[in-house]
Image (cartoon, rainbow, N blue to C red):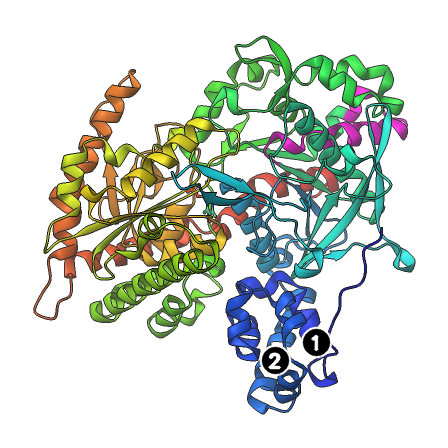
Amino acid sequence: MEQHEPERPELPDRVAGLRELSYDLWWAWHDHAREVFRVLDYPLWRATAHNPVKLLQLVSAERLGEVAGDPAFLHLYDSALEQLHRARTARDTWWSRRTGLGHARPIAYCSAEFALHQSLPIYAGGLGVLAGDHCKEASDLGLPLIAIGFMYPQGYFHQRLSADGWQEEHYVRLDWQDAPIERATLAHDQDCVIAVPLGNRTVLAQVWHVRLGCVQLYLLDTDLEENAPWDRELSARLYGGDREMRIQQEIVLGIGGVRAVRALGYDPILWHLNEGHAAFVVLQRIRDLIEHGTRFDQALEEVRRTTAFTTHTPVAAGHDAFPFSMVETHLAGCWGSLGESREAFLALGGYDNGQGTQFNMTALAVRSSGAINGVSELHGEVTRKMWAPLFEELGRPDPVTSVTNGMHVPSWLSVDMARLFDQYLDARWREQHDDPTVWEDVLTIPDEELWHLRQRLRRHLFTFVRERMRDRWLNQHVSPARVLSGGTLLDAGALTIGFARRFATYKRAELVFHDPARLAHILNQLKRPVQIIFAGKAHPADDPGKRALQGVYHRAVDPAYGGRVAFVDDYDLHVAHFLVQGCDVWLNNPRKPLEASGTSGMKASLNGVLNVSIGDGWWPEGYTGTNGWLIDPGESHDDPAAQDAADAEALYRLLEDQIVPAFYERDDHDVPRRWIRMVKEAIRTIAPRFSTRRMLKEYVERTYLPAIEVVTGKG
Ligand SMILES: *Cc1c(COP(=O)(O)O)cnc(C)c1O
């Protein structure tokens, strides 16, 4: 590799630990650590989109000299560093108290994407956010988790809109020097590079290391000089290529993932596959066991006992499947001592999802996992039905449980809201936020204070949206219409609806425009204005998704809506933070039952943003009748057009009869009491139950521990 060590300004000895702090993403969810960098250089903090690694490359020696002699700064710095060290080495954790187990054998968590911070663009959407939040929570609870994924040097794309609102994808090469990522090393400081057999050749993968407190994430990267040009491209982009590319990526992730874990000296006690992408993990593991003298069926049994699988996709066609010939071509070099049982292994993936029998990654994962779960109760049921033939074949009529997704509270809660909770909730709330009783005191927060905070968060959002458009206007020379579509006419005092998610057609971004005149009437009431902010990317190959996005853009520049419809481009974690904290209402109207869970609505509720949602995904579990609204069309229709009409009608009714009146009904102090009551209910009922703390504890209790106890003979 011809990569050079980055230019790094000398750090004064007294603050030399800044580098260590910047290279542990632990700072991403600890505000006092972020405060260190904010105080160090606020303009740079803003200019780097909160990236301390970059900030430390740019900050002046003079400023570093100043802070090294500033007692207030040093106090902040010392305490952040001390807490980081404590997080890394803590032995008295929830995990150790609950299990009595140490860290000798980790749990390996495999996923094709991880969303941890905007400075590391290796995620596309909800699946990645869930994986990232899972890892952060594991660190907080002290789980011995290591995670395995892909380092995509070009990441997922940046989104721009053409003059006519058509999505354009821009890939920007990540400069690894600018991200909180280091080369994983073996003994004697050697780079960790592993070999993966692919077809009849061998591809090398460099392993990268991302620190997350006590959790370690390892990322595979094939962009090495030693590889052929097409192999260097393998890990270039997330979900960027065709089927051939996809299966090769999955082989690198699965086979390479196991090899990397072994090379680094780990002996996992359990493997957790997050979605089917990583299912080739089981191939390498079975092969390893056979190499040690185990028979195929015994090896499969052993792998099954120690593999957990989480499925996320409620549509049969959404599961990765490949023609057998393609699988055989690319797996040709992978068999080794598994060669004699090649047919038996391939049979593990065989499944006919209606388009003939193919090698299906979910079928492979199901046939080789002991624990299988869906990501909401409803999705668990859908999964049980969808794969029923497979479960029958396995003689396990009902192997699927559900563990409803959650969001990582310290990552998604606004700092200002956290301060308010510090004031009115028991101090236990930070550590025990999955305990519903600590949230009862939300009801004691004075309405005025909560309302003023909600308004402040909305203003933050508007400043963010406006400055983003100013940047596009200044630096990208976009058209005035585009500037307008970005939200420059939005009103910081008006009821604001947020809709931010991938532009997949089943999410129905355009549903709210079903009756244009009726919507225009709702938006343009002089005394009760309403506005909608959209954000989201369409998959590069999804033209219907792009057309829906363009449809939203056309509405945003349509005078009939009065500048009250906006589209914020390049949706990512950073944009998501502003939206889930600053809107008043969070709109979710997928075509049921296609949303497996959804998590953005949970993040919104945590910050007092009220959900208005179809009864799909997590919402049937979250909705209580007083903490948001259920879009209830009364009956379900087989005809999608009829369903759209019924759902839109139910949505308009809610807006007209309930949502808009409740928001604008003010008392003498201009406080919407009824609204604030619902805000408190949303926080109180949703924050604890839909946290990753509750979620991860469920994974430990239902999935990890039973498997571990079988392995260790405990219990
Ligand atoms: C939370 C989040 C998602 C997932 O949202 P859904 O509710 O599943 O649509 C996707 N992308 C980003 C950037 C997020 O923060």
User: Horizontal placement of 47 versus 20: left or right?
Assistant: left
Q: Is residue 595 visible?
A: no
Decide which of 17, 536 is in the foreground and name it: 536
Q: Mark 2 points at which residue?
A: 77
- In-image side of 458 versus 126 (left or right): left
- Mark 2 is surrounded, within 10 Å at the Cα level, by few (under 14), some (14 to 19) or many (20 or more) other residues, namely many
Question: What is the CA distance from the residue labelled 2 to the residue labelled 1?
Answer: 9 Å
Residue linked to disc 1 = 17
Asked which quadrant contains residue 382, the reply is top left
In the rendered image, residue 506, in percent from the top left (x then y), is placed at 39, 29
Give me the disc on residue 206.
none
CB within 8 Å, label 2 to label 1 = yes
Q: Amino acid type of disc 2?
A: Tyr
288 and 657: which one is in front?
657
Residue 677: percent from the left, percent from the top? 20, 58
Q: Which residue is drawn at 37% across and 54% down?
A: 579
Measuring from the top left, give residue 88's x and y in whole percent: 68, 65
| Magenta region, residue range | 274-299
